[in-house]
Image (spheres, rainbow, N blue to C red):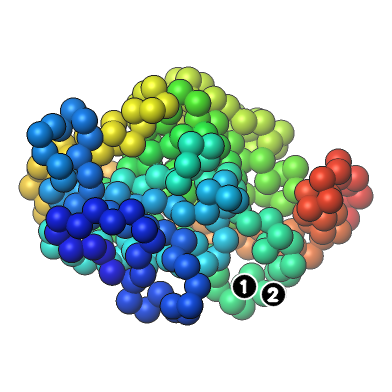
Amino acid sequence: MPKTAHSNDSMPTSSPGAGDDSRPRRVSVAFPAPAPKSAAPLLRMDGVALVTLQRPEALNALDFALLDDLALALEDLDKDGQCRAIVITGAGTRAFAAGADIPELATQTSASLRDEGRFETWDRLAAVGLPLIAAVRGFALGGGCELAMTCDMIVAAEDATFGQPEIRLGVMPGAGGTQRLTRAIGKARAMELILTGRTMNAAEAFALGLVTRVVPAEATVDAALELAGRIASMPPIAVRAAKAAVLDADERSLSAGLASEREAFFGLFDTDDQSEGMLAFTEKRPPVWSGH
């Protein structure tokens, strides 16, 4: 569950219902969040939570367990009447989240992805009513880019890299990439990025309207916390209502688009190219596409 007021333990914390307590949590929660230097002499940010993805050894790759922990942490904070805004970041300096966990995905089929319902966790993340701010350093690729776009605002470091390179693995974005990236930067630019797997730096992402701010790398989390603090000082009911209204204006047909995207993504796990792409990734060699 979220930490109680005045706690600032940086170790991963568990959430009620998080499942097997024998494994380490892949998400840590600091609530209230530590105050940025600009807020001195304050030590804590009242109303602001800092949620950190904790798989730095895997560049914070989004396996199913991490996504489950993240959803539980955000849902707990969303129900906490003292929380007003949430910053999400990745442990370390190399990646916000470098993508999905490819070895875990490589064994899936379209049937297993549908039947196990693991992608429904993304719907839980999108349903959080509190404002979510992604603080992105390093790589935000594939699922990492999709997670950043699921947030309401993105504060990007000058060293941040964004992209949807799933096409290189024989698949396509399956957690909102085709829908949210298109809404953020337009059809033509989204099409080029998704169909080639090209990445873009923070300056380009800002110019295209994907990110809210670009800041020096070492200031990324502090800048996101400052933004969250300003939001947390606003009337909470109005903030929730305003967020919902903006999303309604931007996403009236998003649900249908996400459903279509998900089915297309699942179907690709019945192809030879998906198997080849993920096997080649694991074996660290160029893939050979068959078109089947």
Residue 241 visible? The answer is no
Is residue 217 visible in the rendered image? The answer is yes
Nearer to the camera, 11 or 104: 11
The residue depicted at 37 percent of the width and 23 percent of the height is 215
Q: Are marks 1 and 2 in contact (CB under 8 Å)?
A: yes
Indicate the position of residue 192 as horizontal and vertical percent values: 65, 30
Question: Which residue is located at x 48 percent, y 77 percent?
Answer: 22
Residue drawn at (14%, 59%) of the image: 5
- To which residue does mark 1 refer? 114
- Residue 13 locus on image (x, y percent): 35, 65
Task: Specify the amino acid type for callout 2.
Answer: Ala
Q: Quadrant of the N terminus?
A: bottom left
**Residue type indicated by callout 1:** Arg
Left or right of residue 290, residue 213 in this image: left
- Report whether 47 appears left or right of 54: left
For residue 134, above or below residue 114: above
Tell me the element at label 2.
Answer: helix
Q: Is residue 73 above or below residue 32?
A: below
**Label 1 CA crowd tier, 10 Å (few <14, some 14–19, many 20+):** some
Query: Which of the 4 quarters of the picture holds residue 209?
Result: top left
Mark 2 = which residue?
111
The quarter of the image holding the C terminus is bottom right
